[in-house]
Image (cartoon, coloured by chain):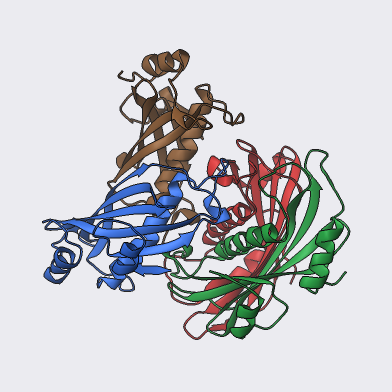
Chain colours: A red, B brown, C blue, D green
Amino acid sequence: MIWDKKKIQDAGIEGNWVMGLHDFVRYSDLDTYDHVNNKVYHTWFENLRIIYLSNSGFDFKNKSNPMPVVRTASIEFNLAMFLGEKYTTVIRCSKVGNTSFDLDYEVHSEQKLKAIGRTKIVMADLVAGKPVPLNNKLRELFITRDIASY
Amino acid sequence: MIWDKKKIQDAGIEGNWVMGLHDFVRYSDLDTYDHVNNKVYHTWFENLRIIYLSNSGFDFKNKSNPMPVVRTASIEFNLAMFLGEKYTTVIRCSKVGNTSFDLDYEVHSEQKLKAIGRTKIVMADLVAGKPVPLNNKLRELFITRDIASY
Amino acid sequence: MIWDKKKIQDAGIEGNWVMGLHDFVRYSDLDTYDHVNNKVYHTWFENLRIIYLSNSGFDFKNKSNPMPVVRTASIEFNLAMFLGEKYTTVIRCSKVGNTSFDLDYEVHSEQKLKAIGRTKIVMADLVAGKPVPLNNKLRELFITRDIASY
Amino acid sequence: MIWDKKKIQDAGIEGNWVMGLHDFVRYSDLDTYDHVNNKVYHTWFENLRIIYLSNSGFDFKNKSNPMPVVRTASIEFNLAMFLGEKYTTVIRCSKVGNTSFDLDYEVHSEQKLKAIGRTKIVMADLVAGKPVPLNNKLRELFITRDIASY
């Protein structure tokens, strides 16, 4: 279930988060340790990112340039997660550059911060193979809606 | 979101379905054709099966014997599915044998039947490596609740 | 590693198999039972199928019509598989119809048959949304090379 | 195919890499952009890490304490990868602490560096829920074999 700003705040999750995906841990998220596998968090970030960027005006159906491309990704794992556990992944843009922007993520569950993530996204002309400036409309949206630094 | 019998019926999905998992297609479900990849349906079936079997009395935390093991699986793909599409996967036991039982699945979306699945599950003593009889309580549950043939 | 007919036969795998993919079980193939998860076999079939169909003349880079689409899939699991286990997945076309064909698969390891699969593939005009006849060149190839029935 | 130090050097991959996994891109590694999906690199790192740590003396079959747990992970994506592309993922320990160590990864293909990764691993007593010191034998191995800083 998609959560908006208000719902995220009502759940006691602090920060300028713009969108959330509330879900529960599925069997396929687990590995041999019966807990959520490390790489699954990246899947959660990715699935939310696509919805968030689509809602922000990106058109993923048109695969022509420029496209948002993940340049770097980092994650910090705080606490293990288990089958059936309800959690919320949240997202916001924390920083806007000329040709790139940072997206931040957190996974919350049981009133605890389970994981923290960040990806640097570069706007790229995939044919020419080089970065291109982010358009002004998106830039403004990230600064006003997400309280992104710039 | 887990759906019960009533919610499944209210959505116009016919049949003696016992439980459903209502969800929407995520980016990670897609392949290079921009539609849900074939093997993802098996993940949906599996994730619902674990919840359904847990609710039916199976204890997956105790990995001692006997355990339900998938012996055969079949699936029929009717219509492609796409990003963001809301769907419901439903499950029931359609047949009970002495040491095995059949679980049936369907995926419904937009008032259409998207896929049909069936798995034969064998109760197995994993240490001895041989099938064991299904206990009477489960047998009765499948027959009365799921209207399983026997 | 891709195996040809001769290499498959030399390994003692019987049948008219045309191509094989020799590999070993990775950690990511496992589930909470420390064995290869059911749906992973479908991934193995799919990965080999794409190579096999490309080698047979299908062009997956051109996503225009007609495309091979999986209509049904079935699998039989014989024996569990574990981390590090070396195995070979083999493939052949067992039957050619007018607009469809059957692909058979087996997974062999340690001189044992671990799993058996079959998928019915339909040649589809994805724009018109209907099946189209398989071209004669492919039909001939399947009959002569794979000893497919027709 | 597992590569040792010599094979890695012979392929022209510079650095004190201890082990490599040479493979080719499978269909299931791709996403809707026809290139290798971001999270798949984490799977490659994970699969190699399990083999590397097993070879270094870790016993993953005994799930009692202490276990190596991923605390942080970061990755930098340099160049897109495509179906059939042959690549080598390499690994080494770059730094040893008291209760933790850093594992570094690189993905090389076509004489180019495709991706760079790092994970901080903590030795954890999962029952007590706290970090424990790395044993001296492993510490020595990482320092002498991997030329890890400390």
Q: Is residue C82 left or right of residue C43?
A: right
Q: x%, y% of residue C25? A: 51, 55
Q: Residue at x 47, y 43 (%)?
A: C80
Q: Is residue A115 left or right of residue B39?
A: right
Towards the viewer: A19 or B94: B94
Q: Is residue C30 above or below residue D76?
A: above
Residue B107 in sight in this render: no
> In the displayed structure, would residue B144 be above or below residue C50?
above
- Give the image location of residue A14, x and y in percent: 76, 48
- Figure quadrant of residue B93: top left
Instruction: Identify the residue at horizontal 80%, vertical 74% (top origin).
Output: D147
Left or right relative to B29: residue C123: left
Left or right: residue C8 versus residue D45 is: left
Above or below, D34 relative to D47? below
Q: Position of residue A60 (x, y in %)?
A: 46, 65
Q: Quadrant of the C terminus of chain B?
A: top left
Q: Residue B46: x and y, percent?
A: 46, 39
Q: Quadrant of residue C63?
A: bottom left
